[in-house]
Image (tube, rainbow, N blue to C red):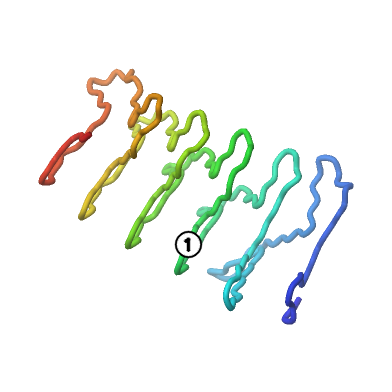
Amino acid sequence: VTANSLTTGTALSLSSTSTTGGASGVSKLLDLSRSGANAQLAHTAYGIYSAVTNTNVTSGTNIAGYFSASGATTANYGVQVAAMTGATSTGLDIGNMSGATLNTGVNIGTLGTATTSKGIAIGALSSATSTGLDIGAFTGATLNTGINITSFATGTTSKGIVLGTNSSATATGMDIGALSGATANLGLKIGAISGTGTGTGIDIGAFTNTGATQYGVNIGAFSGTHNGGTTA
């Protein structure tokens, strides 16, 4: 299909208003299937390949793929990635971003009035080495933020980060690597607490382990000019 004279509208359209889908069945408006053993090395096969590189005089938006799903009473998926069994499997691969103003790897809009909302839900990990969220090196000249959690407004109980039960042989709730900033290094920074109720910067539960040594907070050696284990 060639549509070099397209101004607005659609070059190719598939549509259906059928209301007779079979009970517990599946219907597909477009089904693409590709298989077979390639005879040559280092071949890359695509099921769907989309590239949009239009330039704009002043303002405009390019969208390579747009997906919308709504109306189902059980579940609606914008994109569903089936199980993968390859030696190296990636559900979503986002390449380098080099925008001059703003780059966003994943942008999740407002999650509305559902009883439970999850921006990102990661299922059980069973690999020998498992990482729920792996953030690479930051090289920004002005500000680098690994995870930025904005204010919590109306919830009865709000928690920035919740760590579940950890029953490994060696269990660490939060492991912060070496800090080597030239000006200041903060392992954990807690902003002002101003509520009228009870304010707790860090809440550590009861220790019930049977080990000979127990630490609520274990602070290593300091080598700076001015050293303080805690400051208020």
Residue 197 is drawn in which quadrant? top left
Residue farthest toward the right in the current orientation of the protein: 20
Q: Is residue 32 above or below residue 201?
A: below
Residue 4 in the image: state x and y as whole percent. Answer: 72, 81
Q: Which amino acid type is shown beneath numbered disc 1?
A: Asn
Q: How many marks?
A: 1
For this rendering, which residue is in front, 43 or 2?
A: 2
Residue 186 is drawn in which quadrant? top left
Residue ID at (73%, 47%) = 70
Q: Secondary structure at mark 1?
A: loop
Residue ID at (35%, 23%) = 205
Residue 143 in the image: state x and y as whole percent. Answer: 35, 57
Kindly identify which residue carries mark 1.
103
Q: Is residue 78 left or right of residue 176?
A: right
Residue 33 in the image: state x and y as whole percent. Answer: 72, 60
Residue ID at (79%, 57%) = 29
For this rendering, which residue is in front, 100 or 83?
A: 100
- Of the 4 image quadrants, the one containing the N terminus is bottom right
Residue farthest toward the front in the current orientation of the protein: 196
For this rendering, which residue is in front, 114 or 131?
A: 114
Residue ID at (40%, 30%) = 195
Residue 48 in the image: state x and y as whole percent. Answer: 66, 64
Q: Is residue 185 above or below residue 13?
A: above
Residue farthest toward the bottom in the current orientation of the protein: 5
Q: Residues within 10 Å of mark 1 (few under 14, many from 20)?
A: few
Q: Is residue 41 left or right of residue 1?
A: left
Q: Is residue 63 left or right of residue 141?
A: right
- Of the 4 image quadrants, the one containing the C terminus is top left
For this rendering, which residue is in front, 114 or 166?
A: 114
